[in-house]
Image (spheres, coloured by chain):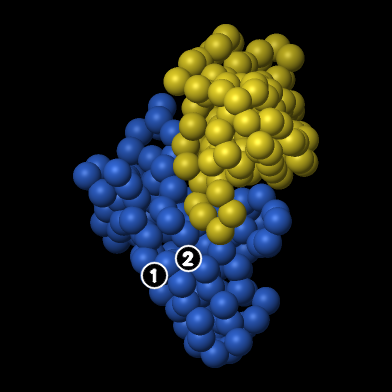
Amino acid sequence: GQNIDQPTEMTATEGAIVQINCTYQTSGFNGLFWYQQHAGEAPTFLSYNVLDGLEEKGRFSSFLSRSKGYSYLLLKELQMKDSASYLCAVRNSGAGSYQLTFGKGTKLSVIP
Amino acid sequence: GAVVSQHPSRVICKSGTSVKIECRSLDFQATTMFWYRQFPKQSLMLMATSNEGSKATYEQGVEKDKFLINHASLTLSTLTVTSAHPEDSSFYICSAMFSRDQPQHFGDGTRLSIL
């Protein structure tokens, strides 16, 4: 089976930097994905890592260490609109299905 | 712009009604689409994997006869909730990927409320 852990809630200040961690245990690892989900809406894709290291996309960066089963999402220059849930998801290539298994999400509150 | 379109966005209907939800990939052909369900304050749970031209693969605990999936073309998958009951009320979301080395893109979701 798969096990994905991420903090339930975080609070950060507008303009600051926040790091959301995700640890996972899985077989057949084929990538780790980060999605943003605002309340009542569907997830939107942010970033993904297949190889170890840092991927940067504007204010968002994601890091992966496959040996440690660890990833983080880094949000810089926080804005109020960044208040949302951030979902860590692991892709498993078992049986060729390429399914995603989602963590429970981290609810980020950005305060003035 | 959106790459996956889902319709309808919201459904309110009586118990016993069957509801069909459509998921379309825009501007690309999706051999595989996925159907998820999300209850309030919980994460997305995969219900089934929909493959074009073949039967869907359902996750453990998901009733095949209750949640009918049809993936008749490379751009359209449908989920029909048959004889829906209040406990089926949830947020249903589809996703599609146009190649296996690319991320899944999600539709806007369908909020289903059964009275």
Q: Earlier in the sequence, mark 1 or mark 2?
A: 1
For residue A3, say whether it is visible: no
Residue at (22% x, 44% y) in the render? B27
Residue identifier under label 2 = B110
Q: Residues within 10 Å of mark 2 (few under 14, many from 20)?
A: many
Amino acid of disc 1: Pro
Q: Are marks 1 and 2 on the same chain?
A: yes
For residue B63, say whether it is visible: yes
Amino acid of disc 2: Thr
Identify the image quadrant of residue A74: top right
Q: Is residue A51 above or below residue B25?
A: above
Q: Position of residue B12 (x, y in %)?
A: 51, 81
The image's mark for residue B38 is none
> What is the drawing colour of chain B?
blue
Q: Position of residue B21 (x, y in %)?
A: 41, 69
Horizontal side, residue B13 vs residue B41: left or right: left
Q: Is residue A24 above or below residue B41?
A: above
Label 1, secondary structure: give it: loop
Q: Which of the chains bears the disc numbered 1?
A: B
Residue identifier under label 1 = B8
Look at the numbered discs 1 and 2 and tell me whether their residues touch, using CB distance below 8 Å.
yes
Q: Position of residue A60 (x, y in %)?
A: 52, 23
Q: Camera-side residue: A9 or B50?
A: A9
Label 2, secondary structure: give it: strand
Horizontal side, residue A53 vs residue B98: left or right: right
> What is the drawing colour of chain A?
yellow
Query: What's the distance in space between the residues labelled 1 and 2, CA to CA?
Result: 6 Å
Q: Is residue B104 above or below residue B61?
A: above
Residue extending farthest front: A112
Residue at (50% x, 15% y) in the render? A55
Residue extending farthest left: B27
